[in-house]
Image (cartoon, grey):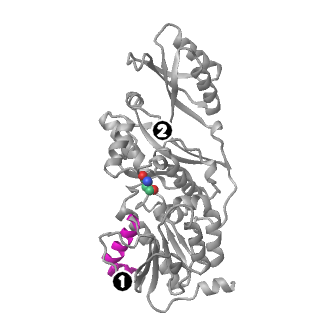
Amino acid sequence: MSARREAARQKPSGPIKVGLIGLGTIGTGVVKLLRRNQRTIDEKVGCGLRLVRIADLDLTRGRGLRLPAGLLVRDARRIVSDPEIDIVIELIGGLEPARSLVRAAIESGKSVVTANKAMLAVHGKELFHEAREFGVDIGFEASVAGGIPIIRVLREGLSADRNLSLYGIVNGTSNYILSRMQEEGREFGEVLAEAQKRGLAEADPSYDVDGVDAAHKLALLARLAFGAEVPLERVPAEGIRGLSQTDLSFAAELGYTVKLLAIAKNVGEEIEVRVHPTMIPKHHVIASVSGAYNAIYLQSEALGSSMYFGLGAGMMPTATAVVADVIEAARAIIKGCQGRVPALGFPNSKRLRIKPLGELRSEYYLRIMAMDRPGVLAEISSILGRNDISIATVLQKGRKIGGAVPVIIRTHEALERDLNRAVRAITGLKSVRGRIVRVRIEDNLG
Ligand code: HSE
C-alpha cells in the first residue's frame, strides 16, 4: 500500500469531523438533519460525527439556522486543507471550482460526499480514479433522484443480479410540467410559467426541460447498472418543450401517457442510453408517477421488475441522501476500510458498444400539421412506405390549428435512421406546415 494511501487510512482518535462547502438549500437541509438527528446518527456511526466548518460565499443571508460564531467561513480552501477534517461535503454544484476543491480534498486523504451530477458526469472518471488512488470514498447518492437510494440499490442491493433495462423519471420539473399538462389540459408555456412563479422550476429551466439534467443522471445510472463507460456526449437528450396539449390528448386516445424517460438497456455486448419524451402504456406502474416525484423502474434477470419511488429534489429529501453518504464514509473511516465498495459498483469498467440512436428500432407517434385537402395523406404514406416504415394507426380529426389539421400516425417498429429521413421528406411537402412532432413509443417496459 502506498504511503499516501497509508496516511489516508489512519483512523481519527476523536469524533469524525465534517466540513461542508456550499450552504444553499441542500446545505441548509444537511445542517438541519445533522442537528435534528445527531443522537441517532452518532449511534449509527458508533462515535460522534461533528460538522466543524461550513464555507459559503454568502456570510450574511439568514437561512433559519443559528450558527456558532466562526463556523461559517468564506474560503472553501480552509476546509479542504484542514488536516482535522475527515469528510468534505461539496454542495456548490457546477464544474469549477467544485472539481478542484473535490480533487484537493481527495489528495488530502479526505472522503467526499457530493450531489453534483454535472461534475461527476463530466469529470467522474478522473475523480473516481483519484479517490481509488488515495484510498478514500466518494459518495454521490444525492446526485441522482435526490432522496431515492438508487445508487445503493444498483451498487449493493442488486450486486448479485444482472441488469437488463432501466427506465427513469429522474427530472421532477419535467414530470411536474407533463403531469399538469396531462391532468389539466394546459399548454407547456403556461404550466412552466406557473411552476417558476411557485418556485418549482428554475428561472432558467433549460437543464431540466431540455433533458440535460436527466442525461447527466443517466450517464451515472447506466454506468452503475452495466459497468460500462458512458461518456456524457454519448447520451442523446431530447426535452419536453416541443410537446403540446394536442400530443398529450392524442397519446391518451391511443392508450398512452407521455413521460420524459431516461432509458438504458443492455442487449448482449451493446447498451442503449437515451433521454426523450416517451409514450408508455397508461396503466403501467411507472405511468402513475406524477407531479415532482421521481421513479426508477428496473428489470434485472433474477429479481425481475422492481421500482424505486420518491422525491428526487428538495431540501430535506436530498439532505437524507447526503447525510447517509456521510454516515457511510464515517463508518469506513472508523473501520479503516475506505474504498471497500467500488464507487461505481465495478472495480473495472467494461467495454460495451453504445448503440447510436440512428440504429434504434422503435414504434413512433408522429404529428404532422397538414392542409386538409385531397391527396395529402397519400403523399405522406407514400414517403413512409418508401422509407420502410409501416403505418399502424392514422387519426385525423378536424381540429384546425392555424389553417392546418393534425394528422396523427402511429408506426409499427421502424429504424430511427429511416424515420428521420422520412420526417425530413414529409416536412418538405408543400401541404405540410411547421415542425413534425415525433415521440418514441415503449410498449414493453416489462
Ligand atoms: N432540477 C432537478 C429536478 C433536481 O427537477 O428533478 C435536481 O437534480
Q: Going by the picture, which residue comes out furthest to the bottom?
A: 13
Residue under the image location 31 percent in, 73 percent down: 65
Is residue 135 placed above or below 178 in the rendered structure? below
Label 1 element class? loop
Residue matched to label 1: 69
Splitting the image into 4 quarters, where does residue 134 fall?
Answer: bottom right
- Mark 1 within 8 Å of ligand 1, using the beta carbon: no
Q: Nearer the viewer, mark 2 or mark 1?
A: 1
Q: Going by the picture, which residue comes out furthest to the top?
A: 374
Q: Tell me the quadrant of ligand 1.
A: bottom left
Q: Which mark is residue 251?
A: none
Q: Which residues are magenta?
A: 25-44
| Residue 194 vs residue 240, the one in the foreground | 194
- Residue 81: x and y in percent read 56, 82
Residue matched to label 2: 278
Is residue 189 placed above or below 322 in the rendered structure? above
Is residue 282 placed above or below 22 in the rendered structure? above
Mark 2 residue type: Thr
Residue under the image location 69 percent in, 84 percent down: 2
- Residue 223: x and y in percent read 59, 57
Residue under the image location 64 percent in, 36 percent down: 358
- Mark 2 within 8 Å of ligand 1, using the beta carbon: no
Mark 1 residue type: Ala
- Asked whether residue 105 is drawn in magenta, I would say no
335 sits left or right of 253 in the view: right
